[in-house]
Image (cartoon, rainbow, N blue to C red):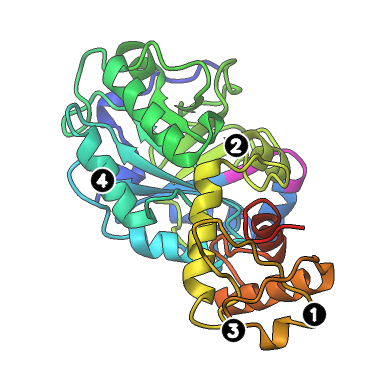
Amino acid sequence: MIDPTVDYSQRAGARERPSIWVEPDESLNLFAHTRDEGMLYAATGQTFGADISEFQVVVNDSYPYPVLGFRADNGNRTDSHAAANWAYCDSHPDHIRVAIPYVIFKPGQSGAIFKRLRNLFGSQCPPQIVPEIDMESGAGFAGPGDHSSEANSFIATLATWAGEQKQTQGYANQPDWSGNWPTPPAWMKKRLAAYNTNPIPAGFYSKQYYGALPYPSPAGWPRTCAPFGSYVDMNMTPRTITQIEADYGIGEADMPVTDAEMNRIAAKVHALIQPDLLRLVQWTDGSENTVFNSTTLPNWKPGVNVNTLDAAALAAIATAVVAKIGGGAGGAVTKADVLAIINSTTLHSS
């Protein structure tokens, strides 16, 4: 069978249009994956996922997959559902293990888009996020022409924000990869929009295979998912979710911590614990190095200088700090983080 030629003038799929030129087939909902099925596929090397925008409902517990893409910025403003979609991802890290917020590329708008992105997610990129640039040649998007220079500069900025080059991604259909972004950086992952039954071509990490448009999809691949129905864009990555996390550098226990990040965490910890926990850390000009032990800790006051390190006391401090900060989702500091901070700074000396 020869796949039909996709009319890319009809792009950009369900996530970019409030109405589509052909009604979605809601009977497809009978073939939607349950959450258990979605997680099983993801565990065995076929990870599906939707990407959505304000033209779909906000994600919820019925969503069946561990990867979710959602529009963060349309090139002019923050997507009206972006904060709610991110709030769900951030508060359900065991469900949404990889969140891919995408921004529409528009020439000359990269700086403004990035400012809004940081306003949405914070000056430090959350660890489970993979920022993505959506490159499209249509009206209201990038427009025609080679935008490689600005797009490459923008993706490099996003990589710096994310902390790793491999934690970034670009998206386009084949004509727009060739015409609008022909020379992307080799280190960036590429997602291809291709509504056909063909396998994912070499050089692409994942494929958007369905966009609520009347073109065929690979046999057995769902064309609908909760809670969005069949008016949704669907993707598949031929990797397990664990492999995907590793490919993006998400959840790596041995990831190197930069000096800037260590200083940021230390400053946050210090600001939180200083008013409490008996003013455990005496921040001085370095003339006095303070060590705590289990004997002096309960009654420690500024000026006390103990010259032996008690590992149990340090663990107690770490536990108290974590309790003060709070646990749960969103990259909370762990006991191991606190111990690393204490053992790698001048908070103690032996």
Residue 115: assigned label? 4
Could you say which disc has been placed on residue 248 in the image? 2
Q: Secondary structure at mark 3?
A: loop
Q: Secondary structure at mark 4?
A: helix
Give the class, few, some or many, for how many residues have Cα within 10 Å of label 3's Cα (few <14, many ≥20): some
- What residue does disc 3 label? 278
Q: Residue 28, position in %: x, y?
A: 52, 52
- Residue 324 relative to residue 313: left or right: left
Q: Could you tell whether 32 is left or right of 295 in the image?
A: left
- The answer to whether the residues at label 3 and label 4 have Cβ atoms under 8 Å apart is no
Identified by mark 4, the residue type is Lys
Disc nearest the viewer among 2 and 3: 3
Mark 1 belongs to which amino acid?
Answer: Ser
Q: Nearer the viewer, mark 1 or mark 2?
A: 1
Query: What range of the chain is rendered magenta?
Result: 43-48
Which numbered disc, 1 or 4, marks the residue that appears first in the sequence?
4
